[in-house]
Every structure is written in structure tokens, then in C-alpha cells.
Image (spheres, grey):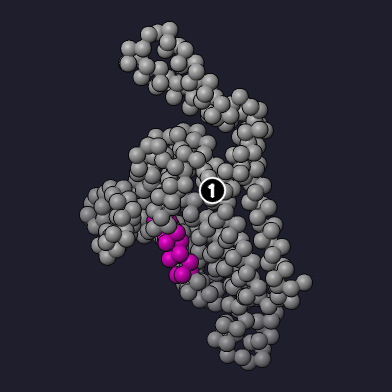
Amino acid sequence: MGVGTVLARRAVALAVALVLVVVLTAIIMGASGYDKTIWQALIHEQVRAYQMSLRQSNVPPGRVRELVAEYKEELTKIYGLDKPWYQRFGPLVVNTLTFNLGISESYDVANVAGVPYPVRVGDAIMLCLPRTIVMITIAQAICAVIALRVGPLIAYKRGTLFDRSIVFYAALTNAIPVWWLGMLLIYLLSYRAGFFPTNFRSVIAYINTFWENPGANFVNILYYASLPIITIVIAFLGSWFYSVRAMVLRIVREYFVMVARAKGLPEKYIVSKHVLRAAAPPVVTNVILSLAGSLGGYIITESVFNWPGMGTLYWVAIRSADLPTILGLTYMLTLVYIIARFILEVLYILLDPRVRY
């Protein structure tokens, strides 16, 4: 079986998994009656607003009742509530898979996106995604770069003071919630020292208009994003160190490394040609999946910094029972994971000769 055939099969399997996630999400929402409850509540609010507008226009009470009944019936047909759930979920799945995510009916979602109500779900996601990348994904990428440089050195100095210090740092930061660390650093570095802003929401304007003045906007984004990035790096760098250390340490103990040393090969050659090459697949897996997972955002940490990213958008959509946004976010994050998995399949073939054979 050739490499192309293997990749094609993996791509098909991942695509099927993506479709199944969307289908199962739609089935759960439909069969449980969750979507019907949401649409009924939405119809109730729209009907009430319509009724109030008619009364303010001095429409006779009898005519108001007729118009309201007609409007409610029309909305019921528009949202498909006159049909069984299994007839509604098909178009919902097709629209989601074709990125026709619809319009959010939540004022809170529009507020998080920073645009007037109503807002298209796709637009809300595309507005919040760059904010999450600036705050969280870049911080995770910094952690990955530092850990990949330092992690192998830690594994080679196992048992030394340096190694024990890193392990202690990893255990300490793993026990401290990142949102609590963020609150502490905001108090010390923003309110007390004045090095960073106390309100980070203003970064939205600079991200949204970045290409209008890239130089000035980059400086402003850097000013607002520095403290959140520093917080996340401090909180997660220890875990990255420990993960890379554990992966490299396992390879260092393998027999082929011992044989290479017994042959008298230079240590640098052993590290580059044997240890790091063998450790590359698990390390790359950790890096790719961590970066992909970071796009989902951190709900509490974003709240601490008043940073309206993907985590905040997801939380607001769930809290306001905004079905289109929930399904759109689920689809988008699943798609990111599927793409990351396929990238890993390609990288495995490039990094590990055993996979090719």
C-alpha cells in the first residue's frame, strides 16, 4: 500500500468522523427537544416584541390578536417547529457542513463579537478567532519553542539540581490555576506597577483594524497582549518542560541509544540522529494538538482579562441557548482538530521512516 493511498484513507476516515460529530450533535439537540425549546423561547420573544409594536401603533385589540396569531404561525413554519425533529435536523446538518451557519439570535453573542445585533455566526467566529490566536495560541507556541530547546537538555541532566528545579516548577505551576495567576499579575503589574493596562478589551479595535495601520496596531496589540501571554507562558511552560522531558527521557533509555554510545559515537550525533529523531513524532503530536486545542479559548482566563475570545463566545452561546452559534463553534473546532490530525499523519510519514515501511 502506497503512502498516497494511506493518506487518502486517513483523510476519508477523518472526514467521516467530522460529519458524524455534526450529525450526532444535531440528533442529540433534536431528539432531546433542546432545539425546540430554544426556538419556542425565541419565537415567544419575537412575538412579544411584535405585539408591543402593534399596540404602540394603536392597532385595535381584535386586530392585534389576529396579526399576532398569524405572525406566530409564520415563525413556527420558518423555524420548522411544525415538523418532527428528524425532518428539521437534515437541513441543519447540511447548512452546517457547508458553512451556512445562519444568524445568531443572541444579543450577548453580538456583544462578544463587538458588532451590532444581529450577527452572522460565521462572522462572530471569525471576529473572535484572531483574538484567541493573539492571546492563547501565540502563548502556547512560545511555550512549545522554549520547551523544545530546553526539554532535551533536562532529560540529559536527569537527577541534577537543574532537573529537580524544572520538575518542581512544573508541579507548582500545574497546581496554580491560570486565571488566579492572571488576577495576581494584573494586580501587581497593572494596578500597582502600572506596566500594563487594567482593561484589555480595547485590543478589539486594534485587531479588527490591523491592516489599516499595521505598524501602530501591532505595537498596541503587543501592549495589550503582553500580560495575558506572559501569564499563560508562566502557567503552562512547566507542563511543556515536563512533557518534552518525559518523551526524550524514554528515548534516551532505549537500547539503540545505548548501542550508539557503546560504539563511541559523538554525543551530539547521538542526540541529533537518534534521540531527537525518535522523539520527534510524540513531541510533534503534543505541539500540533495543543496549538489546535488552544483555538477553543480559555473561558475563565478570558473573563479575567476581559478578553472576548472563542472561550467567551462558546460560554455566551451556551448560556443564551444560541443553537446556531453552538453548532457552528462545535463544527469549527472539530474541523480544526480533524485538520490537525491529518497534518500529523503527513508529518509522521516524513519524520518516522518506520511509518513509511
Amino acid type at mark 1? Phe
Q: Is residue 349 visible?
A: yes
Left or right, 199 with reference to 64 = left
Which of 231/354 is in front? 354
- Is 141 magenta? The answer is yes
Residue 36, percent from left and from top:
58, 28
Instruction: Give the position of the C terminus as an image quadrant.
Output: bottom right
Residue name at image x 37 percent, y 8 percent: 60
- Is 281 magenta? The answer is no
Task: Determine which residue is flagged by label 1.
Answer: 99
Left or right, 242 with reference to 91 = left
Disc 1, SS: loop
Residue 206: name its quadrant.
bottom left
Residue 143, percent from left and from top:
45, 65
Point out the stretch of residues depicted in magenta.
135-147
Residue name at image x 58 percent, y 77 percent: 276
Residue 348, percent from left and from top:
64, 71
Residue name at image x 54 percent, y 29 percent: 78
Residues packed near mark 1 inside 10 Å, few (<14), some (14 to 19) or many (20 plus): some
Whether residue 100 is situated above or below residue 13 in the rendered picture: above
User: How many marks are shown on the rendered structure?
Assistant: 1
Residue 186, percent from left and from top:
30, 51
**Main secondary structure found in the magenta portion:** helix
Which of 323/132 is in front? 323
The residue positioned farthest toward the bottom in the image shown: 264
The residue positioned farthest toward the right in the image shown: 1
Whether residue 273 is situated above or below residue 60 in the rendered picture: below
